[in-house]
Image: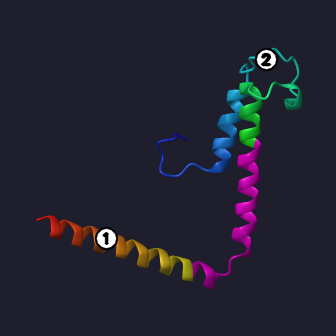
């Protein structure tokens, strides 16, 4: 999946970070154990970033599981209203400039 795609999942990003870990160590640590790498070592930074993305993905999945259909409907209505308001303001702004 390309980063330019409209939607890239968090797990795709985590996988890309993990692939970047290979041979990225610049602190000469010879173990895959992240805790032994220097705090600024790319291997450690990439691995910690991937772990954080996976944690956020789990939290988001747990949150989505708690939403009721009524919650989704209400959020969709709010997003639609905000989008319409933004479009209206943009149109009004364009008229004022002419």
Region rendered in magenta: 51-73
Circle 1 Cα neighbour tier, 10 Å, few/some/many (<14 / 14–19 / ≥20): few
In this figure, which residue is indicated by the disc labeled 1?
87
The image position of residue 14, as x and y in percent, is 69, 42
Where is residue 41, by image quadrant? top right
| Image marks 1 and 2: residues in contact by CB distance under 8 Å | no
Q: Locate the C terminus by quadrant.
A: bottom left
Residue at position x 75%, y 61% in the image: 59
Q: Quadrant of the N terminus?
A: top right
Which mark is on residue 27?
2
Majority secondary structure in the magenta region:
helix
Position of 34 relative to 83 (above/below): above
Picture coordinates of residue 33, whole percent (x, y): 88, 29
Q: Which of the two labelled residues, at mark 1 and mark 2, occupies the earlier sequence position?
A: 2
Whole-percent x, y for residue 8 in the image: 56, 48
Element on which disc 1 rests:
helix
Is 74 placed above or below 39 here? below
Identify which residue is drawn at 63% across, 42% down. 13
């Amino acid at each position: 999946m390309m980063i330019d795609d409209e939607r890239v999942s968090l797990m795709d990003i985590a996988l890309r970070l993990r692939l970047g870990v290979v041979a990225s160590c610049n602190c000469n640590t010879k173990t895959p154990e992240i805790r032994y790498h220097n705090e600024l070592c790319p291997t450690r930074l990439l691995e910690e970033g991937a772990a954080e993305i996976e944690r956020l993905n789990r939290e988001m999945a747990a949150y989505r599981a708690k939403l009721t259909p009524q919650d989704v409907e209400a959020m969709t209505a709010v997003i639609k209203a905000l989008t319409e308001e933004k479009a209206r303001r943009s149109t009004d702004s364009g008229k004022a400039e002419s």
